Amino acid sequence: MYQLIEEGDGLLVKGLKDFDLKDIFTCGQAFRWDLEEDGSYTCIHKGSFVNIVKREDGFLFKNTSKEDFGLWYEYFDLARDYGQIKKELSKDPILEKAIAYGPGIRILNQDPFETLISFIISANNQIPRIKKSIDLIAKKYGDFLGVFNSRDIYSFPGPEVLARAKAEDLRQFARVGFRDERIVKTSQIVNEGLDLDEIFNLSKDEGKKVLMELPGVGPKVAECVLLFAYDKEDAFPVDTWVKRLMEHLYIGEETKLKDIEAYGKKIFGPRAGFAQQYLFYYGRELNIGK
DNA sequence: TTTCAGGAGTACG
DNA sequence: CGTACTCCTGAA
């Protein structure tokens, strides 16, 4: 299905469909990426980083190899047929429009702990600031992975490291504000034995219960982590954008957060997560509902 | 130049 | 159910 051709220190990947880097990285699901001046994207995942250049003949993945490509295959959810998903969802005329706006979206499979901490930071916060805080945390607490475009690249630290971080340091160096103690406490709970991998075996609702026990994790953050790290396709995170957009495009009146979540679940069912991503990207870029 | 409102939610009363 | 919470940006 895909063709992998070694090229220099990288890999040319041919035949990728439903894959657009801008759509994937600006739809709000991930923070560990950078747009380079040449239009390529650099992203960091689980102790590795890759730079991806779009070309006529495919996508050039720099700093990886055939042996290592499995990591990115999994991360970019390449086993999934998004053509089929889009076909199903397009029966809804509103979604058809939304999909046309971000046809290259894929839902990444991100690291659970990193995703958990990232979305705790996202509470009442904005994407540029969230990205900055996460970068600063990696720089201070993560491992040095290498240099790209004369930038030092660091991994995101594990729970064993952040459990020992000082709230005051997180506040001062990473600018996380009132989220400082939530980050340390959640890291401590995970470090002291809460098995995040166990959530892979649970249903979306069971996983949500477990996550919401953690400080800094409410319904929105839990749904995000379940969708972006645990592959729970029926998760439907409702933030202020999705709220406005659902009120505007589907419901037609002011609706409580909880009811919007139920509504999304009702009309999109097991595909709610994909629908949410297409709608979010579409609504935010067009400023729908504001 | 300086002030000021408000924002990808959660916790707490 | 209302409010406080940080910090940063951009509007005035």
Image: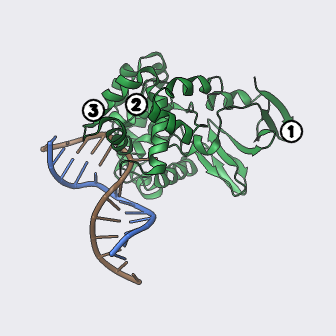
Chain colours: A green, B brown, C blue
Query: Which numbered circle lies on residue A7?
Result: 1
Q: Which residue is mark 3?
A: A258
The disc, 3 or 2, on the residue closer to the chain's N-terminal end is 2
Query: How many angstroms separate mark 1 from mark 3 (CA)?
Result: 50 Å
Question: Which is nearer the eye, A39 or A183?
Answer: A39
Res. A90 in view? yes
Give the chain of mark 3.
A
| Residue A243 % position (x, y) | 33, 41
Q: What is the three-letter code of the residue carrying label 3?
A: Lys
Secondary structure category for the residue under label 3: helix
Give the chain of mark 2.
A
Where, by quadrant of the figure, is residue A207 drawn? top left
| Residue A151 % position (x, y) | 68, 56
Q: Can you say which quadrant of the picture contains the N terminus of chain A?
A: top right
| Residue A122 % position (x, y) | 42, 46
Question: Which is nearer the eye, A95 or A275?
Answer: A95
The disc, 1 or 3, on the residue closer to the chain's N-terminal end is 1
Q: Residue at 47% across / 16% down in the picture?
A: A201
Query: How many angstroms separate mark 1 from mark 2 (CA)?
Result: 40 Å
Secondary structure category for the residue under label 1: strand
Question: Which is nearer the eye, A182 or A203?
Answer: A203
Query: Which numbered circle lies on residue A236?
Result: 2
Q: Are marks 1 and 3 on the same chain?
A: yes
